[in-house]
Image (cartoon, helix red, strand yellow):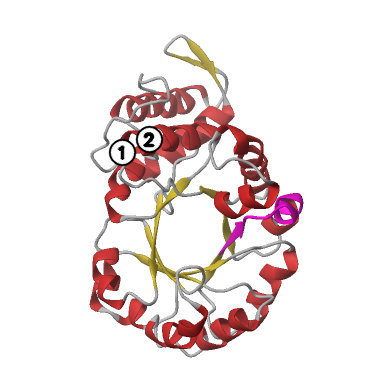
């Protein structure tokens, strides 16, 4: 697995719910996103666009990394969103691009925000059959694209599949490969039954083991379980340190750690893990079968 603190958990909040902004910021998610798309009725789009700026200027915004999900860039509202972002006093760390179906969707965002949001990165949501077909091209569309997101609900409805893990496994695996081939992260769709804690743990473990970097949260109560699932436990960190030491001792040649042969890919992965998570107190997480990794 490739662990990163950048986007283990992504919590979305409707731009219309200004009173919930501080709670979102303090929920413990690696990234909080204010949503202008599905959670905002058409009649409220313009007002939500104005309100969303408060998501970035509020004092509580300093508690997390803040992003914004715009409307589709092939629709007028998506372009209006981008033009509004150019004038925000505080720019979003990330712009989430929904319904990405081609590299052109990412290129449009980059072109409109060029110069006004130089530090802003992009996430692209792949949630249609056409988007999945073009996932490789989307993932490589821009050096500012940091991650792909799987939009399970829209995708399942489009292809007529049941919204469950097994029917969508092929799409998830394909998206993970496209993202990793481009050297970027990949975030799994939300687990919508937010009251089902056991179900969330189970699905987060599946997503982690498939190669996802993190998972979307639809409710603040989901954030701790998601962060735990996408973080290494104490045993895994200890083994990573042993692998790092073995690589150092062997000059990055073949070595044996805990009775298993390890080489360059193991050393690189172990170093990343220790650098990212080695300075904080880790916690155990379950695998799909209930054992620890």
Membership of 126 in magenta stretch: yes
- Mark 1: secondary structure: helix
Q: Which residue is mark 1?
A: 197
203 over 262 or under it: above or below: below
Circle 2 packing at 10 Å, graded few (<14), some (14-19), many (20+), is some
Asked if disc 2 and disc 1 are in contact, CB closer than 8 Å, the reply is yes
Q: Residue at 67% of width from left, 41% of height from top?
A: 174
Q: Does residue 30 appear in this view?
A: yes
* Number of disc labels: 2
Range of magenta residues: 123-135
> In the image, which disc is placed on residue 126?
none
Circle 1 packing at 10 Å, graded few (<14), some (14-19), many (20+), is few
Q: Position of residue 178 (x, y in %)?
A: 68, 46
Question: In the picture, which quadrant includes the C terminus?
Answer: top left
196 over 265 or under it: above or below: below
Q: Residue at 70% of width from left, 57% of height from top?
A: 140
98 over 231 or under it: above or below: below
Question: In the picture provided, is 59 more to the left or to the right than 289?
Answer: left
Q: Residue at 39% of width from left, 43% of height from top?
A: 275
> In the image, which disc is placed on residue 199?
2
Q: Does residue 1 appear in this view?
A: no
């Amino acid at each position: 697995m490739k662990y990163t603190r950048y986007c283990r958990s992504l919590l979305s909040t409707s731009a219309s719910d200004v009173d919930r902004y501080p709670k979102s910021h303090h929920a413990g998610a690696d990234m909080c996103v204010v949503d202008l798309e599905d959670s905002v009725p058409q009649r409220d789009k313009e007002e939500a666009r104005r309100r969303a700026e408060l998501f970035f200027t509020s004092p509580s915004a300093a508690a997390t990394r803040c992003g914004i999900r715009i409307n589709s860039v092939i629709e007028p509202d998506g372009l209006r969103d981008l033009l509004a972002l150019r004038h925000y006093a505080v720019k979003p760390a990330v712009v989430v691009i929904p319904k990405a179906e081609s590299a052109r969707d990412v290129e449009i965002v980059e072109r409109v925000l060029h110069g006004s949001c130089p530090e802003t990165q992009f996430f692209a949501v792949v949630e249609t059959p056409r988007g999945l077909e073009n996932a490789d091209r989307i993932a490589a569309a821009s050096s500012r694209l940091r991650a792909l997101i799987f939009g399970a609900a829209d995708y399942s409805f489009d292809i007529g599949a049941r919204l469950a893990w097994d029917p969508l496994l092929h799409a998830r695996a394909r998206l993970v490969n496209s993202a990793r081939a481009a050297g970027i992260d990949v975030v799994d769709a939300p687990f919508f039954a937010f009251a089902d804690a056991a179900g969330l743990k189970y699905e987060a473990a599946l997503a982690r083991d498939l190669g996802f970097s993190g998972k979307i949260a639809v409710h603040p109560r989901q954030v701790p379980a998601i962060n735990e699932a996408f973080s290494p436990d104490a045993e895994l960190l200890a083994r990573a340190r042993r692998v790092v030491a073995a690589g150092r001792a062997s000059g990055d040649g073949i070595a044996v750690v805990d009775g298993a042969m390890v080489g360059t890919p193991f050393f690189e992965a172990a170093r990343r893990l220790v650098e990212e998570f080695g300075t904080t107190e880790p916690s155990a997480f379950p695998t799909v079968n209930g054992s620890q990794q």
